[in-house]
Image (tube, rainbow, N blue to C red):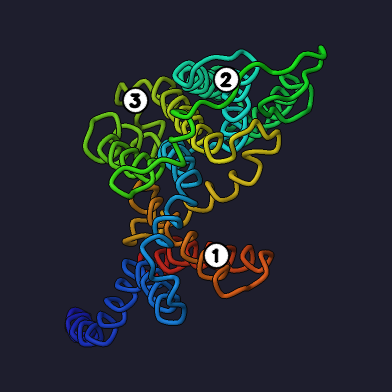
Amino acid sequence: MTTTQSTEVPTKAALPPATSTGLRVQSAVIKYGFIFVTVTLFTYFALSEPSFRDSATLLDTLRYVSVAAILGLGVTLTMAVGGMDMSVGAVAGLGVTVAAKTMVTYNQVGVVAILAVVAAGALAGLLNALLIVVLKIPDMLATLGTMFVIQGTKLILVDGQSITPGMTQSDGTTAPGKFTEGFLRIDRGTVLGVPVSVLIFGALTVVAWVFLARTRWGRVLYAIGANPEASRLAGIRVGAYRALAYVLSGVLASIGGLILASRIGQGDVSAGTSQLLEAVAVALVGTSVLGRGRPNVWGTALGAVLIGIITTGLTIKGLPYYTQDVVEGAVLILALVFSFTLSKRRTA
């Protein structure tokens, strides 16, 4: 019996060379596959469309995705604690309305508008935290409910109409204010040729990375997402940290709203509606970067850049706008395959 077992072990040990090679290839695909896809698409558009290589086009691409990327950072924080914030698009839209209401209707300066928008985002995050942490409603259901409440609230605030400078208000008077020049520079201004919104995107990405990867609070958020019960038994105030994640998500969404308001220059009641899907997409895409299989800030940023590359490249090539959703959806599916299907096979 003993002799039989000892002869079987070398037989099984002799198989790994081919198997290990396959595992190494699979591991490389999981770890670097998404980066390879991004570089390949960028190279293809750069070689086939000369205008794509212009620095102005590249900066405009980053400027275009800055709002979705910042909202995606908020979603990443909530995913780190095992949740999902579905209200970020509505909060960004609320930020547009609050900014327009503050400056156009109440004739306040841009600084006041910025403070009002950030405060509104924090309150939205607190509402999500109340529903999720105190009332124990599942994250996705709670934030979906918040999304509808916020969308309805912003319509009530403006009587269902967009706010524009010089508009006739419901009481028959003319709106006394306008978007200030300083406020409009949030998206339209540049510093050394780089759009301010791109700089904000970059700065927030670095801050979010330091927070999640280099601080105790970030490590605790990941621990809660991995095993909330074990975290609770370890003495971690799980509810407080989950609430923190949603408040920060609300604040980040409001900053995205500030950029969006500066971009469109009016209180468009439909603003922010399309931002939710892009924000969730870039956060989910980010989980596949470097094969981590978990929410990470640099992955979210790369996911946003990839979405921008696809959108800009297809636009330059003259493809109809509705084809972009198909391509973006396919990229998201590919990212999820890298994150879940292939990674599970590697660990099986």
Compute the Cα span from label 3 to label 1: 36 Å
- The picture quadrant where one finds residue 70 is top left
Tell me, yes or no, whether the two marked residues, 3 and 1, touch with CB atoms within 8 Å: no
Horizontal side, residue 93 vs residue 32: left or right: right
Horizontal side, residue 151 vs residue 95: left or right: right
Pointer 2 or 3: first along the chain: 2
Q: Is residue 56 visible?
A: yes
Give how far across and how far down residue 151 sits, in percent: 70, 30
**The disc labelled 3 sits on which kind of residue?**
Leu
User: Mark 3 = which residue?
Assistant: 233
Nearer to the camera, 95 or 50: 50
Nearer to the camera, 25 or 15: 25
Q: Quadrant of the C terminus?
A: bottom left
Helix, strand or loop at label 3? It is helix
**The disc labelled 2 sits on which kind of residue?**
Met
Q: Is residue 133 visible?
A: no
User: Mark 2 = which residue?
Assistant: 103
Pointer 1 or 2: first along the chain: 2
Nearer to the camera, 18 or 183: 183
Tag in front: 2 or 3: 2
Q: Is residue 203 above or below residue 326?
A: above
Q: How many marks?
A: 3
**The disc labelled 1 sits on which kind of residue?**
Ile
User: Mark 1 = which residue?
Assistant: 333
Q: Residues within 10 Å of mark 3 (few under 14, many from 20)?
A: few
Helix, strand or loop at label 1? It is helix
